[in-house]
Amino acid sequence: MTEPRTPEDAATEAERRARERADPEAARLEALGEESRGGLSRLQEWAPIEIAPDTIRSTRRGGAPITRFKRFLARMLLQYHNEQNAQITRFNLHLLGYVAQLEGRVAELEKRLRDASRE
Amino acid sequence: MTRVLQLLSGAGPFDAITNQALAWQRMLAADGLDGEVMAAQLDPALDGAVRGIDGLGRRAGRDDLLVIHYSAHAPALERALELPQRKLLVYHNITPPHYLWEHEPYVAMICALGRERLGAYAGRVDAAVAPSAFSARDLEAAGFADVRVDRRLYEIDRGRLRPGAQEADRGAGPTVVFVGRLSHNKRQDRLVKAFALYQRTHAPEARLVLPGNPGSGTYGDHLAALAREVGATGVELPGGLPQERLNAIYAGADVFACLSEHEGFCIPLLEALHFGLPVVARRAAAVPEVLGDAGVLLDDPDLATVAEAIDLCVRGEALRAELRARGERRLAEFAPERTREAVRGAVAALL
């Protein structure tokens, strides 16, 4: 095909060239870094509450002293925050354990159902 | 005397909705309608143009009009529904939270609540307007009746889009740009990967510039790591930038590429057209409504197709000329007088 002159032709031509090139690197990149957006393993990763101290910062221009002050306050309140995080984490982990148990039971029931329908 | 009080969930210096609310304030003031912009959460970097929403009930006069710009949950906005004044809801859309849980859990939470609480506004505002049919569908699904769609609600001030004192920011090779908050729904991660392919196949000297506020999340760090992992060089993440600096980047770019999966509108598409940039975009959400026929729209594209489309736009002189002509025609539909008319129309019906 000659060089496309319209965006509609360009879209078609881009697809054609991509198919023709069939670059294996394209397939590798497609798969790379795609995050699974759910699932028990992701919940397990999120359940323990840990806030990295460097997430505390000022968004003001020249806000470095405010950032230092905020981090100082966070250190002063560490005992309180640890207790709070521990309570939230405790709830999250217990809930997660319960969900995992339910997931196992559902899987077992589904298996029994499949087996029964085969018999 | 009637005033127009605009209410936002949050306001910041590089926030598109904040800037549009301030633009509405200027337009309405030119029509003799004074007002204020107020937000439930204020970025401390703001220069005082926006006030806190506390005490709204005391400050609002009986005849004032409340314009609720809805883009996230904020209890203070919902409390405004109890006030006796007439109310206009402007729905800018809300990012579905599944895009945000990984890198911005707080934003994900207010988005999840915002989508869930949208129905609470139905029947409690006097009118609702959305800047795209895509966004209007959310309102209808939440129980709103008679939703008005007007695509000209956002100000595209072409006077503001001049490079100014700064020279065009050019690289040694082609420059691909996308402008927008660093957020997973905008899929800068896919753009980094498509760019890596383009660079490897067509233009080793190319660079990718991604200006955008990283917010409080970790998606920016993820993008920087991804660029290293895919072997892309020249990927720049300069953060949120003032307009003059952005203009210099637009002016030095060769292609604007948008792989967003969720956009309530996407003003940078029109800014790119202003700079005569060819636009390659995924046909998703409100993107086709904004771009019309003035860009290369790709249906659910794979990375290789995006890389080839970028290359066609960089090298095809005839294609670039056609896109520039279509871009100018498209921009005429968003001319400032049309926006003024749209804003006046949305507000006047309730005065």
Image (tube, helix red, strand yellow):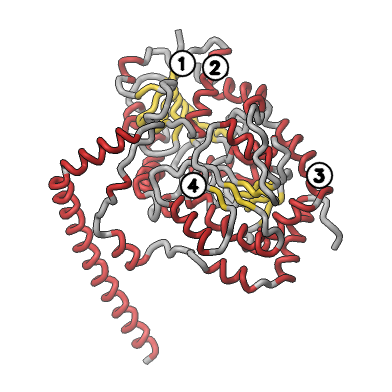
Query: The residue marked by circle 1 belongs to what chain?
Result: B
Q: Are marks 2 and 4 on the same chain?
A: yes
Q: Position of residue A89 (x, y in %)?
A: 20, 57
* Residue A64 against residue B25 in the figure, above or below: below
Dot 3, how many residues are within 10 Å of its Cα: few (below 14), some (14-19), or many (20+)? some
**Label drawn at residue B322:** 3
Identify the mark nearer the N-term, 3 or 1: 1
Identify the mark nearer the N-term, 1 or 2: 2
Figure quadrant of the N terminus of chain B: top left
Residue placed at 48% from the left, 29% from the top?
B18
* Secondary structure category for the residue under label 4: loop
CA–CA distance in space, label 1 to label 2: 8 Å
Q: Position of residue B343 (x, y in %)?
A: 57, 24
Circle 2/circle 3 CB separation < 8 Å: no
Q: Position of residue B230 (x, y in %)?
A: 55, 64
* Secondary structure category for the residue under label 1: strand
CA–CA distance in space, label 2 to label 4: 32 Å
Q: Nearer the viewer, mark 4 or mark 1?
A: 4
Identify the mark nearer the N-term, 2 or 4: 2
Dot 4, how many residues are within 10 Å of its Cα: few (below 14), some (14-19), or many (20+)? many
**Label drawn at residue B35:** 1
Query: The residue marked by circle 3 belongs to what chain?
Result: B
Horizontal relation, residue B136 to residue B293: left or right: left
Horizontal relation, residue A28 to residue B200: left or right: left
Q: Are marks 3 and 1 on the same chain?
A: yes
Q: Amino acid at mark 1?
A: Gly
CA–CA distance in space, label 2 to label 3: 36 Å
Q: Amino acid at mark 2?
A: Leu
* Residue at numbered disc 2: B28
Query: The residue marked by circle 4 belongs to what chain?
Result: B
Circle 1/circle 2 CB separation < 8 Å: yes
Most foreground residue, B63 or B181: B181
